[in-house]
Image: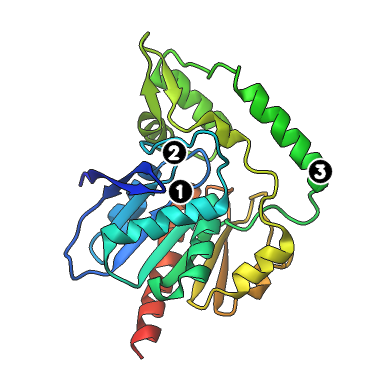
Amino acid sequence: MNPSSHYFHSHRLKLHYWDYGGSTDRPPLLLVHGTQDHARSWDDVARHFHSSYHVYALDLRGHGDSAWVEGAMYAFPEFMLDLVAFGSVVQRFPAAVVGHSLGGVVAMHYAAAFPERVSAVVNIEGWGPPPSVKTKTYTERLRVWAERVLAAETRTPRRYASIAEATARMKEANPHLTDAMAEHLTRYGTNRTADGSLIWKFDPYLRNLPPLGLPTELAKELFAAVRCPVLCVRGASSWAASLAQSPQLQMVERMQYVEIPDAGHWVHHDQFESVVEAIGRFLSEAVSQAAA
């Protein structure tokens, strides 16, 4: 099954998405990737749920085949706006949303601000590091952010001579990946340059996200505002906070929480069968509750 490629516009940007098809009477399922990732990272998940949902996967701004932002920051509200604009494509609400990392945070923003559009959220590690991780003051973060932006303007993107070389870098970043998944992510996550070498598709400025981020108090308010059922999925070997360590997770009113053994931050790649089983069970329950 090969998805079809399409574009839409958000905030004057031309953004890309993949449509995995399905009957128009199936409920929509939106898949939202993480930072420096791309929509085709969801292929296996999309295929698994294709028979029950009309599945879409977005390339958020600055990622995949979507346009890069120039002269502005990549911030959570802007990423959420991409989901809002995508409503003109789906045109059927409410929809279930599955998000990983950045995509999980974006899904929570969307569900909080537009509750009538979201039937359920699966948030895979989209809530930030444990509070034990020391963070700089806001003024320090401002300075570091500005210095990194200026430095990025003169930095040359790293080039790879072959798919195999780029795939090795992908495996280095996530040792849990199988060789096949690492190559798949690399093939859809790179572009050829004029000399035949490869560079990553994502905007290099995404390496330096905005200095404000999502402070704990705002995160708690955001997560508390989500009224639909939420499944939070964490890899037991991940750096992300556990339920006990995360004050924002504890604010979700209708939450289920599951930790997947032998999985890191990319839980849906590391333990695919366990994750899709948990997602399928959760979404079925959410549909049943909504119909009751």
Of all residues shown, which one is farthest toward the bottom?
Answer: 292
Considering depth in this image, is 162 or 214 the residue closer to the camera? 214
Q: Earlier in the sequence, mark 3 or mark 2?
A: 2
Type of amino acid at the residue the image marks with label 2: His
Residue marked by disc 3: 139
Whether residue 135 is visible here, answered yes or no, is: no
Q: Which residue is mark 2?
A: 63
Badge 1 is on which residue?
A: 33
Give the percent coordinates (x, y) of residue 269. 46, 47
Rendering coords of residue 129 (x, y %): 70, 52
Q: Could you tell me which residue is drawn at 41 percent across and 78 percent down?
A: 286
Distance, label 3 to label 2, CA atoms, is 28 Å
C-alpha separation, residue under disc 2 versus residue under disc 1: 9 Å
Give the residue type at disc 3: Thr
Q: In this image, 192 relative to 246: left or right?
A: left
CB-based contact (under 8 Å), mark 3 and mark 2: no
Q: Earlier in the sequence, mark 3 or mark 1?
A: 1
As rendered, which of 23 and 203 lies closer to the eye?
203
Tell me which numbered mark, 2 or 1, is placed earlier along the sequence. Answer: 1
Q: Position of residue 144 (x, y in %)?
A: 75, 34
**Circle 2 SS class:** loop
Left or right side of 109 for 84? left
